[in-house]
Amino acid sequence: MIRNRAFSSALLVATALGTGLWTEAARSQQAGEPRFGSFRASEVNLRAGPGMRYPVEWTFLRRNLPVLVLRELDTWRQVRAADGTEGWVHQSMLSGRRSVMVTGDAAEVLADPEPGARAKARAEGGAIGFLRSCTAAADWCAVEFPGAEGWVARSSLWGVVTPGEPIPVTAPLPEGEPPATGEPAEPAGEGGAGPADGPEDAKG
């Protein structure tokens, strides 16, 4: 489930005026190849840019949701969800634990990685499971869902990159001054979390 945060054009203008321009050095800090990860918290905010000075555009309300990490800038990561929604989250909101989401209406969870194998369960569309095994050339991936573990067709999953599959180019970085490394967390009054939980009480 995602929730849109509306914000005024006046706020966007104020943000742009207050942050200045990106430098070429900042733009060069887009380290790392696109890769999959997952949300660490059950509520994660996606911001318009890499810093807490940028407005929240979306709030995702699902822990372990798989996301594609597109860019890195200091402690911030630009991510893309299965529906194409993109935004920036603090690195503390991401986990390296690999999860996948069932696409389409449903997918069979099979006992063996082959067509016609015994079906152990049926995972509904949108169900999230943890990836156990999925080699680069495999047509089947081993996935653990709550109450069932087995093999699912790779084509029925979002969260694994098919070999040779191009990753669409994302939108340009927003204009503005890059945030300082290790930008402090928001006060405990916003959600009740301290700095140890990362920005916004594990909400990004």
Image: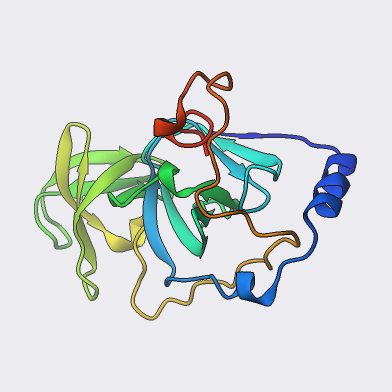
Q: Position of residue 95 (x, y in %)?
A: 34, 47
Q: Which residue is rendered at x = 39% and y = 64% of the image?
A: 35
Q: Which residue is rendered at x = 45% and y = 58% of the image?
A: 68
116 sits left or right of 85 in the view? left
Closest to the observer, 191 or 82 = 191
Q: Is residue 158 visible?
A: no
Q: Which residue is rendered at x = 49% and y = 52% of the image?
A: 82
Above or below — where is 153 with respect to 55? Answer: below
Q: Which residue is rendered at x = 48% and y = 28% of the image?
A: 201
Closest to the observer, 126 or 159 = 159
Above or below — where is 104 with respect to 198? Answer: below
178 sits left or right of 203 in the view? right
189 sits left or right of 165 in the view? right
Count of all numbered marks drawn on residues in the image: 0
Closest to the observer, 61 or 144 = 61
Question: In the displayed image of the protein, which residue is found farthest to the bottom?
Answer: 164
Colouring rule applied to residues: rainbow
Q: Position of residue 133 (x, y in %)?
A: 17, 59
- The quadrant holding residue 58 is top right
- The quadrant holding residue 14 is top right
Q: Position of residue 122 (x, y in %)?
A: 26, 40
Q: Position of residue 164 (x, y in %)?
A: 38, 81
Q: Is residue 58 visible?
A: yes
